[in-house]
């Protein structure tokens, strides 16, 4: 596997118009709302430094895909904790990122009842 540099424009183009750009801790993220559960977004941490517009150096970061409940500010789906590897910045990064985003999106729908219950328990 060969490491490649990814630009912010490449990442945004790969994801399309359903995702919006945001920044978290100087990392460019992309978010897509999950229509079946209001207030939940699929968030992709791109490994792109917001100040540079391209991915960090080899071995410095990886692409991660999570679902965040914006109501409680909690992560509600983290496939990386279930043994799924982070997404390496290699030639297959785009396909792997889109596949993981689809998986996380579907998982949110399956966990709708649970997500709504944790909202009731959150002060």
Image (cartoon, rainbow, N blue to C red):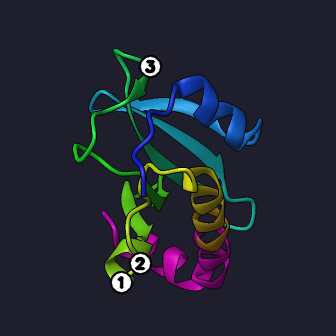
Marking on residue 83: 1
Marking on residue 1: none
Name the one closer to the observer, 113 or 31: 31
Question: Do labels 3 and 2 touch, CB within 8 Å?
Answer: no
**Is 106 contained in the magenta span?**
yes
**Is 116 contained in the magenta span?**
yes
Residue, disc 2 = 84
Q: CA distance from mark 3 to mark 2?
A: 27 Å
The image quarter containing residue 64 is bottom left
The residue drawn where x is 44% and y is 60% is 87
Is residue 13 shown above or below 66? above
- Mark 2 Cα shell of 10 Å, populated few (<14), some (14-19), many (≥20): few
| Among the two numbered marks 3 and 2 on one chain, the one whose residue lies closer to the N terminus | 3
Name the one closer to the observer, 20 or 15: 15
| Among the two numbered marks 1 and 3 on one chain, the one whose residue lies closer to the N terminus | 3
Q: Which residues are magenta?
A: 104-123
Name the secondary structure under disc 3. loop
Residue 65 appears left or right of 24: right
Residue, disc 3 = 53
Is residue 89 shown above or below 77? above
Name the secondary structure under disc 2. loop
Name the secondary structure under disc 1. loop
Question: Do labels 1 and 2 touch, CB within 8 Å?
Answer: yes
């Amino acid at each position: 596997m060969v490491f490649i540099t990814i630009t912010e424009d490449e990442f945004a183009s790969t994801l399309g118009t359903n995702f919006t750009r945001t920044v978290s801790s100087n990392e460019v993220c992309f978010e897509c709302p999950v229509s079946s559960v209001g207030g939940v977004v699929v968030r992709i941490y791109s490994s792109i430094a917001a100040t540079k517009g391209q991915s960090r150096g080899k071995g410095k970061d990886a692409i991660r895909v999570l679902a965040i409940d914006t109501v409680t500010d909690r992560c509600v789906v983290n496939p990386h904790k279930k043994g799924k590897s982070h997404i390496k910045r290699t030639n297959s990064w785009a396909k792997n990122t889109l596949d993981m985003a689809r998986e996380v999106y579907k998982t949110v729908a399956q966990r709708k009842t649970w997500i709504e219950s944790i909202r009731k328990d959150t002060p």
